Amino acid sequence: MRTSMTWRAHKRLSAFGAGVLLLLLSLVLSACGADPTATPTATPTATPAPDAPAGPTATPTPDAAALFQVEWDALIAAAQAEGQLTIAAGGAPSREYRAVVQQFEDTFGITTVMSTGSGSDTINRVLAERQTGQFLVDVGLISIITSDTRLIPGNVLEPIAQYFIHPDVTDQSLWFGGRHWYGDAGEERVFIYSAGLDDTHPIYYNTNLMSAEEVAAITSIPDMLDDRWKGQYVGLVPDASAGLAGLQSAWIDPDMGPEFVRKYLLEMEVTFTADRRILVDWLAMGAYPLVAFTGGVARDLRALEGFGAPVKEVFIPRDTPGLSAGGSGNPIEMFTQAPHPNAAKLFINWWLSREGQTFIHENVEDLQRQSLRNDIPIGNVAETERRAEGAEYTFQDADPAVQPLKDEALVEIAKIWLEARP
């Protein structure tokens, strides 16, 4: 055994060197003890180092559109679970916007009820209900003046911007002037989404009682109150249910002003009625020849003109063009303690969105107001109500600096009206 081992060792010495072999033998003998024969050791194969453990996989951040869609879908589901929406509307929306409200109902499957009749009657009923603990209304399409004088003082309206979630609505760059517009002093409760063009003042006359030549003599705002027209006007009484909004606007109008209103009420011998239908009948049937402040009956008078009745509209030019949003067809409000808050939130966002406002423009005939959105087709907006691109307009209905003048107007007009009544 020793000879054989020495021979093999010699062979290894020739290959590796004696010093290395002796060291190997010493190590083997000390480690094994039993068999001193050196066992060839396989050259270890280099094993690739395992890949470093991967860190957490980055989760892509959902973009704003995806996040909105999740919120929107959840809102639709919550609104559908409530199943109903109730709208308190003024006279113009109750007549003109029914197809738009029906579109909302058809789109989302939510039963939607909108009031009928005048805004004043509707608000009388709503306030009476609330006094007995019945909170039945979700959303308002109510005039600025009614909101200012009755709803806001009664703590009936919520700040509305907190309900805006649709990017069409929240992106103020998509709106006229790059901003949102409000009709209340606090700029938070009466959101204005449309406005009429106020570069002329319309008056109506009976063509059987006045000639075109006589009307052509009215070339300016002051001409409207020429002494020759004393006793010729019929008008709506200046209260919140009828003609107050028009006279309030005239009071703060730079082309009219307090003296104009005072003369109209005290010196022009106007015959007043609180009933819009009576006013229309009196003009159309020839009881009186002139109407200066239409107070929401312009659509009816215009329709009569189209049917061939002896009624004609003429436009008296203004020195200062502006926008007007006083009527109930322009603002939207959110009621406190709404019974269907999710349906109300969905309606407000859809109504103000590109889709909702486009539907109004394209489905309301002879629309006497233009959306304050900049990104929708002009549709059926009347030629006389279209803003000129790049033009500048005053917008007193949405100017908080004018609010003290509006408040003053209400007080002073009430005093003058008491003085004027027999």
Image (tube, grey):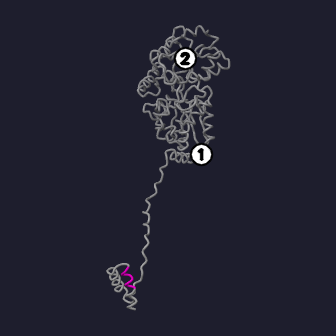
Secondary element at tag 1: loop
Residue 284 vertical placement versus 121 (above, below): above
Residue 361 vertical placement versus 234 (above, below): below
Does residue 7 show up?
Answer: yes
Q: Nearer the viewer, residue 306 or 258?
A: 306
Q: Residue at x 53, y 15 (%)?
A: 316
Residue type, mark 1 in image: Gly
The dot on residue 292 is 2
Residue type, mark 2 in image: Ala
Between marks 1 and 2, how big is the CA–CA gap? 44 Å
Q: Which residues are magenta?
A: 8-14
Q: Position of residue 310 (x, y in %)?
A: 65, 15
Label 1 vs 2, first from the N-terminus: 1
The dot on residue 83 is 1
Q: Residue at x 54, y 7 (%)?
A: 228
Q: Main secondary structure of the magenta part?
A: helix
Q: Nearer the viewer, residue 149 or 187?
A: 187
Q: Where is residue 16, by image quadrant?
A: bottom left
Q: Position of residue 234 (x, y in %)?
A: 57, 16
Q: Residues within 10 Å of mark 2 (few under 14, many from 20)?
A: some
Q: Is residue 17 magenta?
A: no
- Going by the picture, which residue comes out furthest to the right? 308
Q: Position of residue 345 (x, y in %)?
A: 53, 41
